[in-house]
Image: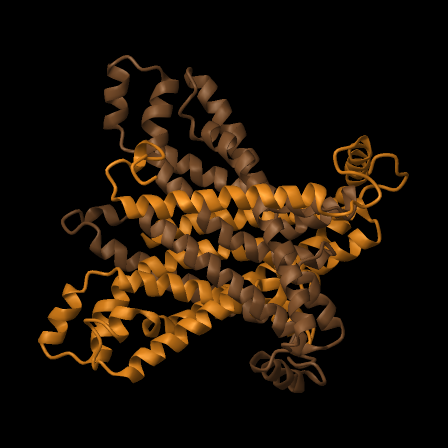
């Protein structure tokens, strides 16, 4: 249809597809507004006063020493879950990522099956949110800290594996060809060519995931596994907003701290 | 220390870089070892240890329950009516995710210019005044705050304010993703080629015109791409905010789990996976269109 105007490639088509995207986005947003049930009003009966209480506690959190001690212990628990979960994620993500990159297989058919199976597994792991994994693990094996670690490690492993496989594929090909011509096996090409070239980006992405891991680990507390999310839940059950915000400020501080650390690491690893 | 490169890729870099990086990796290793030590030795375990036959038998009986093995009633995932019921919930989950992505996008679009250093305090700033720099700081603080608190916790706070339904869940998702989208888009603006903007400026365009005709058109394609990436994350998280916010699949999932209706859990998980898969496909197609 548009192929009749090859003289000015790109431009008209780009503008048309932009218009299409704008229309689709606006239409989808308008449709989603129809999904809201407006009949009972938007707010709860005393909801508006809850806004004031939440905002007041946001500026004046409870800073009593006892509570800060509890917050520190909860923060430690959250950090333990995040780091241990990331370890599991690495154990899943590195082997499956290498297989999914399809860089080690010898035969064509072998590559297709290996890549397909590995990619499918990774996609399944990351399709389910960590909290859903946590609920399933708690239902299956009971309230054990390992439920939290596995619940975090499995979806994060799925994400890490996908990103690792893409990074391993996207390295420049010329150095690899040079290695192959000098007689290196596929394993050696991988170990001394592909891996060293992809490693900085892999490390950098892993550090970024640590920051997300802290947030996710805090949420896992919600299913009863301890940590900051659990404390927030207890405080909310008492409607003690000032205590809620103590824990939330601790969480924000942790996330910002890890964010600063990981962005420093990433800046130094950037080419 | 600094003279021994840790691996091949760091050779040729300056010594200070090496120490920070190897130090970070070292800290990471220490953190991993401490946390596992704490997990294995530092806590009193519940009734049984994790690495035991008990865990295996519990897990396998749970999987059997999910499949509906040994029950006389028909599993929920084989009943057409249950499928239709869960389908309606899936539809409202989808609406929640679109609403959340839309609200986050509107919020980020209105603010991300003010979070870009080059526009507010750098070479494109109209005046170098502390007022503009302070504004930059405030917007960035709000981004950091909104994205540091996870969606579920926003939802836990919002259910005290809003009536149950898809609104509290969508708002919780929107607040969290507003911070992420805003930060990412501001970084896009900071990385833009500023020559077109400066050319406009020298030909007499005002600040607003420079933003509207040089910066925004260049930043929008990346913004759209990020929006669709976030949508993929949002659809995975709608079930989670639904656990507390009473909208979509999440609430039903929680009820089915606590009532031990495990075959319903399976059915809801199937719908959830279908939604995730569908959104991934649509998002990939839209991102290709936006490029």
Q: Which image quarter: residue B93? A: bottom right
Please name the residue shown 32% across and 43% down the image.
Answer: B18
Q: Nearer the viewer, residue A45 or A215?
A: A215
Residue B47 can be seen in this image: yes
In the rendered structure, the answer to whether residue B244 lies left or right of residue B285 reads: right
Q: Nearer the viewer, residue B189 or A93?
A: A93
Q: Is residue B211 above or below residue A224?
A: below
Q: Residue furthest top?
A: A183
In the rendered structure, the answer to whether residue A149 lies left or right of residue B284 reads: right
Please name the residue shown 13% across and 75% down the image.
Answer: B201
Q: Position of residue A172 (x, y in %)?
A: 27, 33
Q: Residue furthest front?
A: B1
Please name the residue shown 23% across and 46% down the image.
Answer: A3
Q: Position of residue B10 (x, y in %)?
A: 30, 37
Residue B270 can be seen in this image: no
Q: Residue furthest right?
A: B72
Tag count: 0
Q: Nearer the viewer, residue B13 or B117?
A: B13
Q: Which image quarter: residue B11? A: top left
Q: Position of residue A216 (x, y in %)?
A: 59, 55
Q: In orange, which chain?
A: B
Please name the residue shown 55% across and 71% down the image.
Answer: A33
Its colouring scheme is by chain
Q: Quadrant of the N terminus of chain B?
A: top left
Q: Position of residue B255 (x, y in %)?
A: 78, 57
Chain A tint as drawn: brown
């Amino acid at each position: 249809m548009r192929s009749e105007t090859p003289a000015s490639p790109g431009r008209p088509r780009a503008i048309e597809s932009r218009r299409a995207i704008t229309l689709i986005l606006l239409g989808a947003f308008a449709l989603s507004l129809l999904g809201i049930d407006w009949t009972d009003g938007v707010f709860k009966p005393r909801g508006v006063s809850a806004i004031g209480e939440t905002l007041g506690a946001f500026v004046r959190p409870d800073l009593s020493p006892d509570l800060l001690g509890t917050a520190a212990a909860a923060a430690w628990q959250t950090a333990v879950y995040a780091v241990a979960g990331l370890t599991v994620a690495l154990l899943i993500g590195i082997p499956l990522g290498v297989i999914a990159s399809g860089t080690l297989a010898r035969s064509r058919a072998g590559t297709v099956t290996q890549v397909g199976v590995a990619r499918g597994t990774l996609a399944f792991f990351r399709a389910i949110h960590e909290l859903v994994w946590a609920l399933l693990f708690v239902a299956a094996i009971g309230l054990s800290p390992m439920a939290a670690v596995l619940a975090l490690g499995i979806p994060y492993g799925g994400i890490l594996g996908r990103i690792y496989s893409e990074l391993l594929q996207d390295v420049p090909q010329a150095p690899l060809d040079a290695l192959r011509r000098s007689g290196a096996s596929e394993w050696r090409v991988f170990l001394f060519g592909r891996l060293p070239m992809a490693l900085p980006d892999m490390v950098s992405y892993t550090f970024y995931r640590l920051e997300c891991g802290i947030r996710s680990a805090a949420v896992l507390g919600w299913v009863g596994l301890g940590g900051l999310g659990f404390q927030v839940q207890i405080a909310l059950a008492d409607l003690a907003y000032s205590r809620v915000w103590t824990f939330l400020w601790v969480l924000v501080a942790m996330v910002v701290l890890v964010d600063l650390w990981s962005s420093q690491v990433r800046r130094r690893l950037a080419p | 220390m600094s003279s021994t490169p840790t691996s091949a890729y760091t050779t040729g870099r300056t010594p200070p870089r090496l120490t920070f990086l190897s130090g970070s990796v070292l800290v990471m290793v220490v953190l991993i070892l401490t946390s596992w030590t704490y997990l294995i030795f530092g806590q009193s375990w519940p009734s049984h240890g994790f690495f035991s036959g008990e865990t295996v038998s519990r897990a396998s009986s749970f999987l059997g329950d999910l499949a509906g093995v040994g029950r006389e009633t028909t599993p929920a995932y084989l009943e057409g009516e249950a499928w239709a019921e869960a389908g309606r919930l899936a539809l409202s989950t989808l609406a929640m995710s679109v609403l959340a992505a839309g609200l986050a996008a509107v919020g980020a679009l209105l603010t991300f210019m003010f979070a870009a250093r080059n526009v507010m305090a750098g070479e494109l700033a109209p005046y170098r005044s502390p007022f503009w720099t302070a504004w930059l700081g405030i917007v960035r603080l709000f981004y950091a705050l909104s994205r540091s608190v996870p969606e579920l916790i926003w939802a836990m706070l919002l259910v005290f304010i809003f009536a149950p339904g898809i609104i509290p869940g969508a708002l919780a998702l929107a607040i969290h993703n507003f911070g992420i989208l805003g930060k990412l888009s501001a970084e896009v603006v900071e990385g833009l080629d500023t020559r077109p903007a400066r050319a406009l400026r020298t030909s007499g365009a005002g600040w607003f015109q420079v933003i509207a005709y040089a910066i925004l058109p260049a930043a929008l394609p990346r913004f759209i791409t990020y929006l669709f990436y976030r949508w993929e994350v949002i659809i995975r998280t709608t079930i989670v905010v639904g656990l507390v916010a009473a909208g979509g699949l999440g609430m039903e999932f929680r009820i089915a789990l606590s009532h031990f209706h495990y075959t319903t859990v399976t059915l809801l998980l199937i719908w959830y996976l279908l939604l995730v898969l569908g959104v991934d496909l649509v998002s990939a197609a839209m991102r290709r269109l936006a490029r």
